[in-house]
Image (cartoon, grey):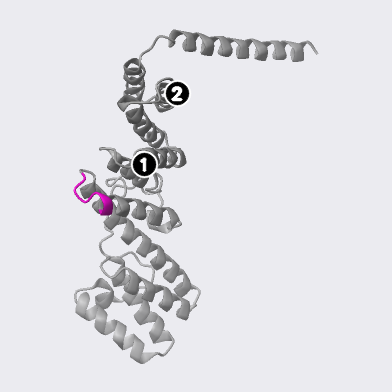
Amino acid sequence: MLRSVALILMLWWLSACNLLTGREVAESQEDWSANKFYSEANQKLTEGNFSGAVKLYETLESRYPYGRIAQQAQLETAYAHYKNDEPASAIAAADRFIKLHPHHANVDYAYYIKGLASFNDNWGLMGFLMKGPFQQDMSERDSKMSKESFENFKELITRFPDSKYAADSRLRMAYLINSIAMNDIHAARYYMKRKAYIAAANRAQDVVKEYPPTPATEEALYIMIKAYEVLEMQDLRDDAERVMRINFPESHFLRELPEVGALPWWVFWR
């Protein structure tokens, strides 16, 4: 009984301390200008205290809702959420900025943040090239976020082709489209292993039709060749091989015919 009472008193004391601390902080900020809020928020952002930065940006906007600094705080809020691994909040903040300020000089950055936030667990361009031995391949995951990220970057370069973020967005789009294609390749490999050859051929055919410029096309054609071969669809098999020999005359798949699902020759870092 005494322990329970002591625990309740301790919890009450801690909550009271937090309440007092929060009140003291609010009182200390009463005379802050918009510039002061913005400067302090940026300092927290630099220090990596992203949640603290968000609170200050939001307080700034509530105290000084109009003007250039408030607009910039809204934009920085989206970035702080992104850096704090809160993609949904980052996208919501970016969407809000776009809705409120569609003609702002930096609205292209809001579109860029949306693309980054949905770039599947915040993997950077170097991140997908330098993965650890136990890190899952992005293409092995649900492609929904990859498609969403692709569309966000696409909207950026369509609306702002000369944006300083356009070049990086195009690089990310190129990676994303191959990742989406490889997602279908993983499914086709699975169908081959389960001897569902028609499903495998159809999935591989989708890659060839929808994503022809991607490296995934090479393995897609190989899967089609093997699936049609088992199904004794000789004409379709020969057509797939003909296309493969024209487009990938030096293909590892044509030279050695490895098992479906074997790593392509270019994956040398695994």
* Residue 160 to residue 204: above or below: above
Q: Is residue 47 visible?
A: yes
Q: Residue at x 28, y 47 (%)?
A: 125
Q: Quadrant of residue 46?
A: top left
Q: Which residues are magenta?
A: 158-163
Mark pair 1, 2: CA separation: 18 Å
Q: Position of residue 18 (x, y in %)?
A: 56, 13
* Residue 182 to residue 157: above or below: below
* Residue 47 to residue 229: above or below: above
Task: Identify the mark nearer the N-term, 1 or 2.
Answer: 2
Q: Position of residue 80 (x, y in %)?
A: 38, 31
Q: Position of residue 163 (x, y in %)?
A: 21, 45
Q: Which residue is mark 2?
A: 62
Residue type at mark 1 is Ile
**Image side of residue 7 versus residue 171, left or right:** right
Q: Which residue is mark 1?
A: 98
SS type, badge 1: helix
* Residue 166 to residue 219: above or below: above
Q: Residue at x 28, y 43 (%)?
A: 108
Q: Position of residue 252 (x, y in %)?
A: 25, 72
Q: Quadrant of residue 56?
A: top left
The prevailing secondary structure element of the residues shown in magenta is loop
